[in-house]
Amino acid sequence: MHLPTNCFLLCFLALAATLPAAKADPTDAIAGILPHRAVYSYALAAEKSEADYLDAAGEMTAVWSDDCSGWVVEQTSRMLIERTGGIIIDFGWSMESWESKDGLQFRYFLAQSQQGSVVSQAQGRARLKAHGEEGEVEIRTGGETIALALAPGTVFPTWLSLDVIDGLRDGRLPLWHVLFDGADEPEALSGVSTFQVGERTATPEELERFSPLEGQELHRIALAFFPLQDDTGEPDHEMELTLALNGVVTELLFGFGEFTVRATLEELELLPPSSC
C-alpha cells in the first residue's frame, strides 16, 4: 500500500535515530547488478493527484553501465503536466554521472529545462575521505564555483541504491542515508528514509516482455527525502519504486505534493558486461 506523508513523518520521527546507516561495503549488490538501458512512459496517477491535474505525458530514459572503475549513470526526462484551464507544465532534466565503485568519488553534469529549453546547468566533483567521514564538493553553476563541505556519513546516489538492494537481500530495511546527488538545489544534502512496502512476482506480461525479470522478486519500496537544513520534519518529496535485485526498476511513482506521476517500464535493453 502507499505510505502517505503523515505515515512517513510518524515513522521518521520515531525511527530516525535508530535506522541503520549506510553499509560500509555492499559488494553483494554490486555483483548482481545488470548494466542496462531502460525507457519509461509517464502518466498521471489520478488517484494520488488533486482534481485540477488532468493528465501527464512524457518519457524518461535511464542507462546504468559499468566502466570498470565506476558506475556511469545517464538519465534524460521530459514531463508534461496538464491542468484545468489549458495550463501545460513542461519541465525536464538531463544528468550524466560517474561514481567510483568504492563509493568515495562522484562527478556529475546536470541540465534542467522548461518548455523544452535549458534554463540551468551545473557540474560538480565530490569526494569523501572514507565511508562515515566528511568530504567536499566543488560545484560550477551560473558562472561561479562553489566549494562545500559534505557532512560525515554522506553517500552518493549509486552507493545508496546498492545499499538499498543489499538491505533488501539481508533484511536491513528501513534504512537512513544522508545523500548528495547534485539534484535540486546543488548545495543541498537530503536525509533519505527507505522502507519496504510490499513485494510481488513479475506478471506473465512482464516476463514475456522483459526476460531479466525471470526468477526475480519485485520489491516495492518508498523513499522520503528530507532537507537537512529544515527542522520541520516534512519531506521535500517522496518516491515509490518497484525493483528487482538485479537493479531493474519496473515502475516509479514521483510525488510532487499536489500531483503524482507514474513512470512505467516500456523498453529494456541489457548492455554488454564490462571487460575488466
Image: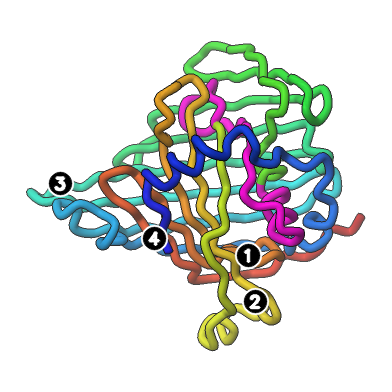
**Image location of residue 134, percent across then percent down:** 74, 20
**Callout 2 crowding tier (Cα within 10 Å): few <14, some 14–19, many ≥20:** many
Instruction: Name the amino acid, label 4.
Output: Arg
Instruction: Please identify the residue farthest to the left as the structure is shown.
Output: 85
Which is in the foreground here, disc 4 or disc 3? 4
Q: Is residue 187 magenta?
A: yes
Identity of the residue drawn at 41% across and 64% down: 41
Q: Secondary structure at mark 1?
A: loop
Q: Which comes before the other along the chain, label 4 or label 3?
A: 3
Q: Is residue 2 above or below residue 87?
A: below
Identity of the residue drawn at 82% across and 22% down: 129
Which is in the foreground here, disc 2 or disc 3? 2
Provide the residue span drawn in magenta.
Answer: 161-190
Residue on which disc 1 sits: 248
Mark 1 and mark 2 in contact? Answer it, CB < 8 Å.
yes
Which quadrant, please, contains the C terminus? bottom right
Label number found at residue 262: 4
